[in-house]
Image (cartoon, rainbow, N blue to C red):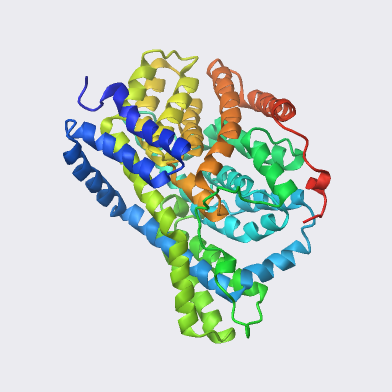
Amino acid sequence: MPPETYGLISLFPALLAIGLTLVTRQVLMSLFAGIWIGSTILVGWNPAAGAARSLQFVVDNVTASFNVKLLLFTFLIGAMLGMIFLSGGMNALAGRMAERIRTRRQAALGTSLLGMTIFVDSYASTMITGSVMRPITDRFDISREKLAYILDSTTSPTASVSVVSTWLGFEVGLIAEQLSNIGVDRSAFLLFLESIPYRFYSLLAIALVFILTLTQWDFGPMEGAERRAQTEGKVLGDNADPLMETQEDDIDTPDHVDPRWWYFAAPILTLVVMTGFSLYYTGGGFAGRGVTDALANAATADSIVWASFTGCGVILAILAGHARVSLEKVSDAIFEGFKMVMFPVAVLSLAWSIGAVSQTLGVGPYVVAISEGVVTPGILPAVIFLSAVLISFSIGTSWGTMGIMFPVAIPLAAAIGSPLAPAIAGILTGALFGDHCSPISDTTVLSSMFAASDHVDHVNTQIPYAALAGVVATGLFLLAGYGVSPYIGLPIGLLAVALSTYLLSERMSVELPDSYGSGAD
């Protein structure tokens, strides 16, 4: 066996953690079990040494520069939300929005559109959309599972295909590196644009959100969650353990405070504007670079930390200066906000760690080696897509999957004469598919967090939808491999997804109340 991979056994730690998570619903213990098993394999099957190696994996990943900044961002967001809850601004804004949003369909559609509108950064989009829309979707009895699904399926897929986002620099950089390695003189950015019509899973995942939102054709576990929310008024299941523990009702707004809608809007708008400004600044926008070039070279982690800190400063100034709230109450709200994000921080830390364990065991080289043994030019795009799916599902990171796949898949495509655009798209969108299905994915965790949903319930309800779009996408990649234009394939795929959704909803669902399109709370 080559030293860079442990073969089939390299898949075991991640699959064990995922299986235990789904069966026991104990996320932290399941993740650590996977880390420990993988570490034990790495140190020669010594369980004691494996435990020590497990802790080192956690330390290394928590203290990695990007990760520690993301954790700081998460804590700052928790502090900001705690202060917003104290101000009463979220409820005030929800009340004003509810005057204009009169049906469940409008609430779900508004969530979907907002998730796509904030396309500059997927993390910021998830946080903002979830925080703004959760009180609205709760009011119209939309299940937290449905909210988490909408967040997960509109934020990252949109950011990944946007020409103005924090994903752009990473994706274009990977493409440019491989073009240089294989000696192809082409524009990496133009090749990125050429790959967008082939991003079949990303585009179908977004389309499926709107199909479900507009038609009410839910199926599988999601149908049960939506039926529970509509008939019983329970946005969470009886045994649910929301990933975000603290809610608005846990922090009392002082009696003398008259909540204003802009108490919520001001820090959130500051967060959005400051994120854009910071991305532009760190990418060299003020040094003469264009917007797209600046975003492609921006320091994402630094930017979101600066933005969240500024948002905290704005709501603190509002509470102390306008609402006249004592600093003691503000301090208590900040600590409640910290409590709110402690569990997600723990999950993220262990999710990163088990991803690192899987990479150290050689999941990527193993999957790629298997794929190379069966590849032909016609099936190459589909093989690349499925390989990216398996790797991202196992390691829980779409960006990590891209980094693993590009150095192998692109030279292989060039060597056998397969078009580069479908191959690139297979990597970029396949990484998203596995990421959506994996409970150890950071974006999946953040979607559960800001929807205040049970994490396991989010994964269980989302997988059938992701699988439907993924199966259709696989078929479209096969068509693309044999020369079918994506502009022909995509309409076929959309029709297949819509028809399959309808048939599955008829066979796997029961009729829901007519209140879906009504204004009934």
Q: Nearer the viewer, residue 469 or 24?
A: 24
Residue 101 visible to the viewer: yes
Quadrant of the image for the N terminus? top left
Residue at left offset 50%, top offset 59%: 245
Q: Splitting the image into 4 quarters, where does residue 493 fall? A: top right
Residue 201 position within the rendered picture, expressed as x and y whole percent measured from the top left: 56, 32
Residue at left offset 54%, top offset 86%: 321
Residue 145 position within the rendered picture, expressed as x and y whole percent measured from the top left: 60, 46
Residue 178 visible to the viewer: no
Residue 155 position within the rendered picture, expressed as x and y whole percent measured from the top left: 56, 47
Residue at left offset 46%, top offset 20%: 383
Q: Splitting the image into 4 quarters, where does residue 205 fall? A: top right
Residue at left offset 29%, top offset 38%: 357
Residue 391 position within the rendered picture, expressed as x and y whole percent measured from the top left: 40, 31
Quadrant of the image for the C terminus? bottom right
> Considering only vertical position in the picture, is 274 above or below 283?
below
> Considering only vertical position in the picture, is 350 above or below 76?
above
370 left or right of 5? Answer: right
Residue at the outermost front position: 238
Q: Nearer the viewer, residue 323 or 369?
A: 323
> Considering only vertical position in the picture, is 145 above or below 334?
above
What is the number of callouts on the image?
0
